[in-house]
Image (spheres, rainbow, N blue to C red):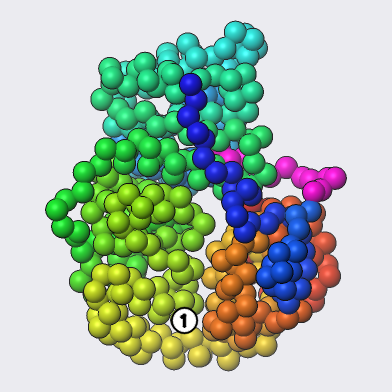
Amino acid sequence: MKSDHGVIFEKKPGVFFGGVGTAEKLHGDFKQGCLQNVNRAFGLGQQCPIATATRVVQAIDNSVLIVHSPIGCTGVMNMENGSMKIHSRLYGLPERNSWIMTTNMDEMDIINGGEAKLKETILEAVRRHDPELISIMTSCASGIIGDDIDSVIEQLQPELRAILLPIYCEGFRSRIPMTGSDSAFLGIQRTILKDAEPAAEKQDLVNVVVLPTTGPKDRGYLGELLGRMGLKANFVPYFGSVASLKNMVNAKVSTSVCVAYGSELLEFLKNKYDVPFTKYIMPIGSLETDEWLREIGRYTGKEKEAEQVIAEERATYLDRIKALRTRVEGRRVLICNNLMRGLANAAIARDLGLDIEAIQSIVYTEFMNNEYAGSRLSEVIKPDTKISFNGMQPHEFVNLARKVKIDLYLGMGGEN
């Protein structure tokens, strides 16, 4: 019997997908409960949840990723594996490929079921790599025919050293790719953390949930800031390990570089293991970094240390930021980023005196609504700033870009 697959991202309370408006109108509609989704008659292709699930588990040390799918579903792995190889070099490690396998489902598997082939692939992964963790992802094909990967796992798990981690990330389940990462984190809490035993006392440890885009310099800087407060950073899951994931239960607080990334896992750690988590946007921007450190200080009893670090960092960097501001102040900017990076880039725009004409994001959430209307960003998010939350559909991004006059573009590609 299949287990509960978890929350679909766009069905979470306070999440809206598909729409556009001014900051003032969206804030008002949200407060009055009148904000509505837009059901498109047309949409371009976007990322599959398999991609975002892959980013959670592919770089966990000594692990194999199996995609239970036709081979075409693993096409995205070329990009994700490229990221793995680049980061290996950046971390000073030997360059290596991710251990990725596919069951290579064909027409006969679709007709007769692919569970036997999945079992064979799991045993082959053990034979080739003897991993500590095997993540097993579903696909549209295996989901439509109803292959029961839970029963395969229940049959094989007692025989294997490797932890078998199911991830239900069929593309048809959600229009928001981040559902894949939610499913992966749900799998982690139900397998790796299922029987985790916390120590008698919490450690001076901070769980820092990081994305692949958090490079070694980012990690090094965040780790240094926490180290100066007398704390140790536990970076998970990217380039983490099964041991570091299990050790999350011993931390005094958790934080994520993106509030939407790993939120289900952080809620689980809070409820079951009494590990609270911060709810601020990523530590990018002067005020945001200050609040990030202060919040961690409050949870760990390091308030004085946090204020000392904040004072030292402001003395080091504020003059540099002011010098840069003189070069770009008043320039009009369009921001295009996924969720919290859009907020983080708005904070950068505030610090540099940029004029935000429009922001495009994947979705619109309660957290984003509060930040847009909050004191930290209210001076840069004007009432008439255009906000589009459309899954980063490329054609809608182009349409938005044509409607605003800008000097700078801050973000990534037009789709995500």
Query: x and y percent of residue 70 in the render?
Result: 59, 22
Q: Residues within 10 Å of mark 1 (few under 14, many from 20)?
A: some
Q: Nearer the viewer, residue 376 or 53?
A: 376
Q: Is residue 43 magenta?
A: yes
Q: Amino acid at mark 1?
A: Leu
Q: Is residue 263 visible?
A: yes
Residue tagged 1: 287
Which residue appears at 35% of the width and 55% of the height?
270
Which residue appears at 73% of the width and 81% of the height?
383
Which residue appears at 23% of the width and 67% of the height?
231
Q: Nearer the viewer, residue 130 or 271?
A: 271
Query: x and y percent of residue 105 in the render?
Result: 58, 17
Main SS of residues in magenta? loop
Which residue appears at 35% of the width and 17% of the height?
156
Q: Nearer the viewer, residue 258 or 9?
A: 9
Q: Is residue 68 magenta?
A: no
Question: Quarter-wise, where is residue 76 in the image?
Answer: top right
Q: Which residues are magenta?
A: 39-50
Question: Quarter-wise, where is residue 319 in the image?
Answer: bottom left
Query: x and y percent of residue 142 in the render?
Result: 58, 22
Q: Is residue 376 left or right of residue 236?
A: right
